[in-house]
Image (cartoon, rainbow, N blue to C red):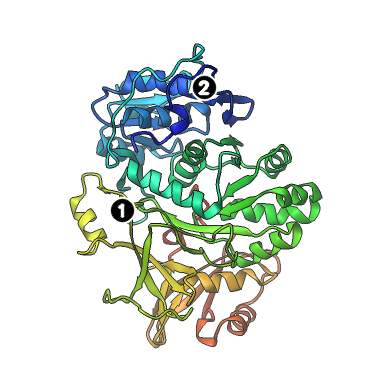
Amino acid sequence: MSSLFPGLTDGPTDTPDERPALRFGDRSLTYAELAASAGALADRISGAGGPVAVWATPALETAVGVVAALLAGVPAVPLNPKSGESELGHILKDSSPTLVLAAPGEQLPSTFGALERIDVDVDVRPPSGAALGATYDLSPETPALIVYTSGTTGPPKGAVIPRRAVAATLDALADAWQWTSEDVLVHGLPLFHVHGLILGILGPLRRGGSVRHLGRFGTEGVTRELNDGATMLFGVPTMYHRIAEALPGDPELAEALGRARLLVSGSAALPVHDHERITAATGRRVVERYGMTETLMNTSVRADGEPRAGTVGVPLPGVELRLVEEDGAPITSYDSETVGEIQVRGPNLFTEYLNRPDATAAAFTADGWFRTGDMAVRDPDGYVRIVGRKATDLIKSGGYKIGAGEIENALLEHAGVREAAVTGEPDADLGERIVAWIVPADAQSPPDADELANHVAARLAPHKRPRVVRYLDALPRNDMGKIMKRALPSD
């Protein structure tokens, strides 16, 4: 456990390891070069005395900086370069980093003040037979990263993620996805969160494979890399929606995706309609998985399992998962209809919210289950289907508990709907009424409310039809493409 990256710390060899490790555009590092660059930086920061911030641009320097921190046993705090002044200031004050790592020439905001800066040098080259300059004896519980939540219900909280959780999640995914050193991953995800950084960068490095980062997502880059030997693609629903939209006019993209071993979507639910369009054009099914900042990965559709559209698969090895009623009582019989809150337990969990013992205590049950706040139903064979967040997506209408997610999927199957979000609002008769927020495919000729209500009622059930329809030019989304329902207009 002392090493998250066996390939970087196996000691001297007669010849440098020239396998490709990281590529960002036309810049790349072999495993030997990564070991030299990250090892030299690890030696510099090993006595930092506290966390180190990493200015997480989509660049080689971010990957080298995080790997160096992990090698040295120093917690890394990845920072979103698009953070506003207030959010960035909160994170810096809360995490109290001793220094910041950044790419040479990168302009940092004045919010950093006089904080010491170290430019990450990715051009350190190893002499023949060289290994890392120092070996650090690290516990599984040593903090690896402090990753800040999105802060939708208040200031972002710093989730302290131990080395144990990183290793457990990546090894469980290797089992579920049959992920090996032969795999080449391509993605264009940001590097300040779990999906892009832990899964998308650290995952390939733990397996001894390689990653090619697009810098900025585009279907042309996906086609190029899959045609050039990449085997896996990671993306979020917004990316796969763009792929689905492009496929009818881009046979080369369809052929490239058809050659991929694994297509993975995460960070939010991929609409069933996009699943179906991609499968029809490519013959490949997109695999979904479910995780959170605090839990890393909990479930996934397995590479050797049934890729059931609209579900996030089954619990990963080592992860316990249950659904509970509002009073906390576990649901003991799964029928694909009963909605409950997901609670999880396992080695993939975070340690605590930094400086927030109150929030940490509130997040766990007395016997160690983490309250995710996500609502789901579960099939009798164990497959999990997320229906929304407890705070924003569970609608109690007419005595029914209704998940917004399934209504959104139904709305997206209507040809006149480009984007959809569903919320509840107070209703004197029903308790809450269902409200659909629609971005029409044709703004000049949107589908009317009765047409959409009947469309949903025919696919789901009459009590799940929207009672109110509101039209927008676009839905508010965060950097990961998740719809920010709290940012929807108040009326």
Name the one closer to the observer, 298 or 265: 298
Name the one closer to the observer, 276 or 408: 276
Q: Quadrant of the N terminus?
A: top left
Residue 147, quarter of picture: top left
Q: Please tell me the numbered disc located at residue 154.
A: 1
Q: Quadrant of the C terminus?
A: bottom left
Q: CA distance from mark 2 to mark 1?
A: 43 Å
Residue drawn at (60%, 73%) of the image: 410
The first of marks 2 and 1 along the sequence is 2
As displayed, is residue 196 above or below residue 68?
Answer: below
Q: Residues within 10 Å of mark 1 (few under 14, many from 20)?
A: few
Count of numbered circles on the image: 2
Residue drawn at (27%, 24%) of the image: 48
**Mark 1 residue type:** Gly
**Mark 2 residue type:** Ala
Residue drawn at (29%, 21%) of the image: 114
Name the one closer to the observer, 120 or 441: 120
User: Which numbered disc, 2 or 1, marks the residue closer to the eye?
Assistant: 2
As displayed, is residue 216 above or below residue 133?
Answer: below
Instruction: Check disc 2 and report the residue beneath it.
Output: 32
Residue 464 image offset from top left, x and y in percent = 51, 81
Taking the image as shown, residue 179 lies to the left or right of residue 110, namely right
